[in-house]
Image (tube, coloured by chain):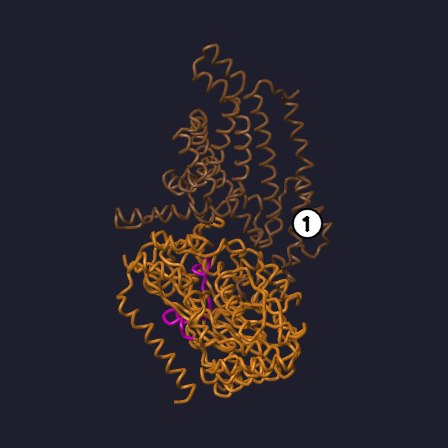
């Protein structure tokens, strides 16, 4: 197992280098540069001497190949560079935002799993009954509804309902406080985004759980288990669900990795200072150094989450070995 | 009544209108924390001398002092400037070329050290003559300054190369914060990441991209101010967040400006718990033609496109949905140097009879052989008001048979298209802080003189007219020279089309008192005069 993990980690290196080269080239294909945006985006006249001084400071006049080699070397030494926009170390920019994104991702995943697996299983077990139809309707609505729209609507609803009940509209806090500092304030801010993201996430997972369960429930070994008189509960929990979870776990892993950097609009709607919002800012500001680091972070999260999923496979299905 | 007297009378009336509610507000109350929204992600740095974004001003201005400023009690004035760190506004000597400022006694930086004229002169030298390795974004504003010096601890002298009416407004620049000389000497970049000023609030905390906080400076030199105990600026670039925050009372005010739809929504949903202040905005969109591309090198084509636009009917209609309102020429409408409506109506594109105007436009296009003109209108990927203005323009041009396709691009490529001269016609932005018509209208000079003009034309006559105007110090003669420069720019040569000026709408909870709107979101942001009626 350990050998497998080490091999997988080593195989991630070419993936990371490929992603690095790709993002390096793509960011530089966008016309314009950070200095002009920084000095002129307010609509003020851009002073050319200031732009040139800024470019010199940021090393934008260096040949591209040198910039790329610097970038690769710095990553090898775990130096992720300095943000071209803020002048802060990229690691600081990311570490400031990571807890928010991580918290939302974990909470949304917990919500999704808690809803999706029981409901997906029930839906499969009660196939084509009214219960199945209701669950499927909830799932399809979740897939069809964009999280950001649901987010905006939930905020409006909270404002309207609190206004109707108390006469004073209430809105969740808009500046993030760490859970360890003020749990109540923290939860009142992140609960709504976690629920709205978790709902869409659960809808996708619910559909996958249902279809995987339906497939497994038609397998010969389930029929055999029933024929030998095993309790239905044992059949479902021990034999069907565990096997049906393989594709579900894969989906959860991919979705979790996506949530780390992909909650762009949801983070904006709830004013969450997370990785997704930072990503958009970095691209808008043409902060190449920061954008590169964020892409690398997301790639790394994807690689790691896939690895975790693969390891979970072995636990879920003893037939799978990594020798 | 002469034009100038009329403009002044209007200015006095406006000042009176903005003063009356202040008196009605009653005596200021002490205490409380003002939470306000900053509609941006985060300022690139804290150094006002190098940055141009309002995000830096809204976040950091409360921690700093300036030498002079627009009057906090009447920031709508476009001609009045008052002391902040100085004791009284000086009368220029040496034929208008020397300004001597006396600096207040007893002003302290937040670390307790004394602020002197040496700090003031040093900060200004850094702005006007930036040393190698430092960036001063507005250095071009101060081309008239020969030197600034502090002969003693309480005097700062500015010596100019020539007398000009542009100097005092330039000196009131809201980014021109006074830094501590000793700190700058040790590390010229210290102020990019750190804050240490002498303003009404002391910096306490900054969470990157989230919030900035400060507490009352008990040693502030304007007695009694600030009224607030603390301030907290929360960054939120999404408009819906800011509107909801105001409605839910998570924030008390947003200083940049919201569109009319947001104002209407808030007034409807929050009733009298919110109030609106509005003002013409010293920002606008300019439509620039690329003279290096055919057929825009032909003045008849440019003039035809100018004549097709019905500004007088379009502006009121647009103002219902977009942050634009007042029709103006090259000078901000609130300035004494601005054209009156009657004067504007003599210029192509502002004629009162739009049918006559469009008939002339069609004739010019036919004469130029450009009847079926098709081109690309490059625009910035920003809703308010860029895309609204662009879409409206396309409709106006369609009325003379011209087909324009709007190409909306992000900020970086938008700048690149302008700087690289790859556009046909572009929707530009021209956003200034202090109303300073002499400097602000430099935008219309050819690229050889003003590098940020992207029209790509040579026009010696334009330079001659501008120079005559900028060297003039008699208000009446300067106004006449400005008209000649404006007529040449917009009518004779039709170098650009000036779109209706932006309109600033600031929403606040009704308990926020003392703050007055100005024609720029960069001005009046030290928050010293705000108090909460709770």
Quadrant containing the N terminus of chain B is bottom left
The hue of chain A in the figure is brown
Residue identifier under label 1: A25
- List x then y, in percent, for residue B89: 43, 76
Left or right side of B481 for B240: left
Left or right side of A241 for A59: right
Taking the view exactly as shown, the residue that stands out farthest to the front is A128
The quadrant in which residue A323 appears is: top right
Q: Is residue B352 visible?
A: yes
Q: Nearer the viewer, residue B19 or B116?
A: B19
Residue ID at (66%, 50%): A26
Taking the view exactly as shown, the residue that stands out farthest to the top is A228
Does residue B492 lie above or below A109 as drawn?
below
Q: Is residue B163 visible?
A: no
- List x then y, in percent, for residue B113: 46, 59
Tell me the chief SS of the magenta region: loop
Residue ID at (61%, 44%): A293
Please give the range of residues in magenta: B59-77
Left or right side of B284 for A54: right
Taking the view exactly as shown, the residue that stands out farthest to the bottom is B1
Does residue B257 lie above or below B19 as drawn?
above
Does residue A30 lie above or below A90 as drawn?
below
- List x then y, in percent, for residue A102: 49, 38
Task: Identify the secondary structure beneath mark 1.
Answer: helix
Packing grade of label 1 (10 A; few <14, some 14-19, many >=20) is some
Quadrant containing the C terminus of chain B is bottom left
The hue of chain B in the figure is orange
Whether residue A171 appears in magenta in the rendering, the answer is no
């Amino acid at each position: 197992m350990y050998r497998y993990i080490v091999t997988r980690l080593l195989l991630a290196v070419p993936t990371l280098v490929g992603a690095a080269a790709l993002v390096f080239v793509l960011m530089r294909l966008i016309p314009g540069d950070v200095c002009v945006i920084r000095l002129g985006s307010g609509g003020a006249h851009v002073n050319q001497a200031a732009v040139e001084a800024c470019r010199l400071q940021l090393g934008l006049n260096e040949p591209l190949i040198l910039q790329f080699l610097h970038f690769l070397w710095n990553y090898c030494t775990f130096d992720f560079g300095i943000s071209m926009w803020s002048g802060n170390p990229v690691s600081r920019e990311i570490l400031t935002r990571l807890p928010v994104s991580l918290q939302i991702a974990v909470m949304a995943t917990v919500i999704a799993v808690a809803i999706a697996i029981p409901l997906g299983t029930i839906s499969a077990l009660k196939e084509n009954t009214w219960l199945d139809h209701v669950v499927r309707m909830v799932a399809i609505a979740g897939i069809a509804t964009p999280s950001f729209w649901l987010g905006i609507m939930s905020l409006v609803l909270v404002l309207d309902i609190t206004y109707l009940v108390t006469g004073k509209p209430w809105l969740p806090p808009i500046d993030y406080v760490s859970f360890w500092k003020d749990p109540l304030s923290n939860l009142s801010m992140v609960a709504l985004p976690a629920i709205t993201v978790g709902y869409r996430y659960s809808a996708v997972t619910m559909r996958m759980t249902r279809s995987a369960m339906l497939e497994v429930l038609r397998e010969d070994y389930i029929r055999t288990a029933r024929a030998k008189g095993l309790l239905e509960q044992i059949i479902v929990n021990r034999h069907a669900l565990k096997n049906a979870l393989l594709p579900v776990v894969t989906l959860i892993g991919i979705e979790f990795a996506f949530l780390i950097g992909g909650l762009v609009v949801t983070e904006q709607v709830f004013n969450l200072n997370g990785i997704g919002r930072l990503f958009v800012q970095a691209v808008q500001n043409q902060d190449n150094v920061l954008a590169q680091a964020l892409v690398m972070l997301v790639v790394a999260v994807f690689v790691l989450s896939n690895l975790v999923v693969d390891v979970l496979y072995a636990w879920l299905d003893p037939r799978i070995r990594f020798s | 009544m002469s034009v100038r007297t009329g403009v002044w009378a209007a200015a006095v009336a406006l000042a009176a209108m903005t003063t009356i509610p202040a008196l009605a507000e009653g005596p200021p109350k002490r205490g409380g924390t003002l939470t306000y929204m900053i509609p941006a992600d985060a300022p690139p740095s804290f150094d006002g001398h190098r940055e141009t974004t309002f995000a830096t001003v809204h976040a950091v201005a409360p921690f700093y002092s300036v030498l002079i400023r627009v009057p906090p009690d009447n920031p709508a004035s476009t001609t009045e400037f008052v002391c902040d760190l100085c004791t009284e506004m000086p009368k220029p000597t040496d034929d208008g070329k020397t300004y001597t400022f006396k600096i207040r006694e007893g002003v302290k930086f937040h670390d307790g050290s004394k602020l002197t004229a040496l700090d003031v002169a040093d900060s200004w030298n850094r702005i006007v003559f930036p040393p190698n390795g430092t960036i001063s974004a507005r250095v071009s504003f101060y081309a008239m300054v020969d030197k600034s010096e502090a002969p003693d601890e309480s005097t700062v002298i500015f010596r100019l190369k020539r007398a000009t009416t542009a100097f005092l407004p330039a000196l009131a620049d809201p980014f021109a914060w006074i830094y501590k000389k000793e700190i700058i000497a040790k590390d010229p970049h210290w102020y990019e990441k750190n804050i240490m000023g002498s303003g009404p609030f002391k910096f306490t905390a900054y969470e990157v991209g989230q919030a900035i906080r400060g507490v009352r400076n008990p040693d502030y030199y304007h007695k009694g101010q600030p009224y607030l105990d603390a301030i907290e600026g929360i960054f939120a670039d999404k408009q819906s967040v800011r509107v909801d925050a105001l409605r839910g009372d998570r924030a008390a005010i947003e200083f940049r400006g919201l569109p009319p739809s947001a104002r209407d929504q808030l007034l409807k949903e929050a009733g009298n718990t919110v109030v609106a202040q509005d003002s013409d905005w010293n920002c606008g969109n300019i439509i620039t033609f690329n003279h290096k591309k055919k057929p825009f090198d032909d003045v008849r084509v440019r003039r035809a496109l100018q004549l097709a636009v019905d500004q007088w009917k379009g502006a009121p209609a647009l103002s219902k949905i977009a942050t634009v309102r007042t029709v103006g020429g090259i000078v901000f409408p609130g300035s004494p140097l601005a054209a009156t409506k009657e004067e504007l109506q003599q210029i192509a594109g502002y004629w009162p009879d739009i049918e006559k105007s469009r008939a002339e436009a069609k004739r010019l296009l036919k004469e130029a052989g450009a009847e079926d003109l098709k081109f690309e209108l490059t625009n910035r990927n920003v809703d308010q008001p860029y895309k609204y203005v662009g879409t409206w323009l396309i409709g106006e041009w369609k009325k003379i048979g011209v087909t324009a396709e709007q190409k909306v691009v992000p900020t970086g490529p938008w700048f690149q298209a302008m700087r690289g001269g790859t556009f046909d016609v572009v929707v530009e932005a021209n956003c200034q802080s202090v109303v300073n018509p002499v400097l602000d209208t430099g935008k219309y000079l050819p690229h050889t003189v003003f590098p940020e003009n992207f029209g790509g034309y040579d026009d010696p006559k334009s330079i001659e007219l501008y120079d005559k105007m900028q060297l003039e110090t008699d208000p009446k003669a300067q106004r006449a020279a400005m008209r000649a420069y404006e007529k040449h720019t917009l009518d004779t040569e039709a170098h650009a089309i000036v779109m209706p000026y932006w309109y600033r709408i600031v929403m606040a909870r009704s308990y926020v008192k003392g703050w007055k709107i100005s024609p720029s979101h960069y001005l009046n942001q030290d928050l010293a005069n705000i108090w909460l009626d709770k």
